[in-house]
Image (cartoon, rainbow, N blue to C red):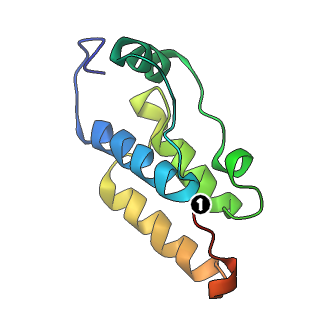
Amino acid sequence: EMAHEEAVDGRADLYSLGCVAYFLLTGRLVFEADTAIQMIVKHLQETPFPPSVRTPNLVPPALESLVLACLAKRPADRPASAAELGRALDALQLQLEPRSEEHAVRW
């Protein structure tokens, strides 16, 4: 939004949080580029690979959906607030089965 000189609200922070979550789930940046300008263009124009493409069978589909929602290009397509995202994560936590240490993978 800032690059387009659009109004910026808390959903811009949710995009940033989506980038951090993506890295934590995959060990890779959402986009890779050689220059800062190329990186900005990718964030503005490209759709990220789902985390499950980079780490098959490790990211629960519901968590992947939340991360991708945070990475939506249009702010209106992201969670409306951090509180809304928090409620979705709380609900998701109740659905997930605990994982053992053997499931942990170093990225």
Q: Say which residue appears at 34% left-offset and 42% top-offset.
A: 16
Locate the C terminus and report the quarter of the image it occupies: bottom right
Q: Name the residue nearer the viewer: 102 or 72.
A: 102
> Mark 1 falls on what kind of element?
helix
For label 1, count other residues whose C-alpha is less than 10 Å away and answer few (under 14), some (14-19) or many (20+): some
Give coordinates of residue 76: x percent, y percent.
Answer: 43, 32
Where does the N terminus fall, quadrant-wise? top left
> Residue visible at 56% across and 43% down?
68
Tag 1 residue? 63
| Vertical comparison of 86 with 54: above or below | below
Which residue sits at x=28%, y=15%? 3
Q: Is residue 17 left or right of residue 55?
A: left
x then y, percent, for residue 29: 49, 40
Residue 79 in sight: no
Amino acid bearing label 1: Leu
Q: Position of residue 67 (x, y in %)?
A: 52, 50
Q: Nearer the viewer, residue 87 or 45?
A: 45
Q: Residue at x 69, y 78 (%)?
A: 103
User: Toward the viewer: 106 or 103?
Assistant: 106
Quadrant assignment, res 104: bottom right
Kindly tell me whether residue 41 is visible in this rendering.
yes
Q: Is residue 18 above or below residue 73?
A: below
Relative to the observer, which residue lies in front, 17 or 28?
A: 28
Position of 89 compared to 5: left or right? right
Q: Is residue 103 above or below residue 86?
A: below
- The x and y percentages for residue 58 are 70, 64
